[in-house]
Image (tube, rainbow, N blue to C red):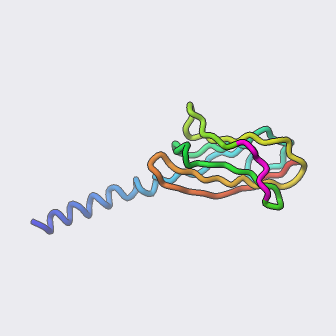
Amino acid sequence: MNMTRIAIAGGMLLALSPLAANAHVFPQKQEPGAGATVETPARVVVTFDGPLEPAFSTLTVTDASGKQVNTAKSAVDAQQPRVESVALPALPAGKYTVHWVAVASDGHRTHGDYSFNVK
């Protein structure tokens, strides 16, 4: 009887494992886009493939020297919980890096970065 319970528990774990793999969220669209060269943008907007936990998800933007350029705090859109944005000041020409931390609504955390250029 214990072997049956173990087999059932193992089967349940295997059945749930694809859900665990899908629990992390990743960027699907960035504005400005990765590698893009643009006029100074008013904000950075990143759309993820799943809903975010607003209290723990962040976007920051740094210049080529690593100094943070955004003074505003990033925010997850209350109407679109997959979208996070941060306002930017007028940026001089140069390379900028967006650093993102995305916490899925179930608590799984991912992070990364990408760069864009201002003409």
Residue 13 position in % (x across, y down): 31, 60
Residue 15 is left or right of residue 76, and the answer is left
Question: Which residue sits furthest bottom?
Answer: 3
Question: Which residue sits furthest left?
Answer: 1
Who's the residue at 50% across and 53% down the image? 24
Residue 117 position in % (x across, y down): 83, 51
Q: Please count the marks in the image.
A: 0
Tell me the quadrant of the picture where the N terminus can be found: bottom left
Q: Which residues are magenta?
A: 67-72
Res. 55 image quadrant: top right
Residue 2 is left or right of residue 76, and the answer is left
Q: Main secondary structure of the magenta part?
A: loop
Visible in this render: residue 110? yes
Who's the residue at 60% across and 39% down the image? 76
Residue 26 is left or right of residue 86, and the answer is left
Residue 98 position in % (x across, y down): 72, 52
Residue 69 is left or right of residue 30, and the answer is right
Question: Which residue sits furthest top?
Answer: 79
Who's the residue at 52% across and 45% down the image? 53
Residue 113 magenta-highlighted: no
Residue 67 position in % (x across, y down): 79, 57
Who's the residue at 69% across and 46% down the image? 30
Visible in this render: residue 35? no
Residue 71 magenta-highlighted: yes
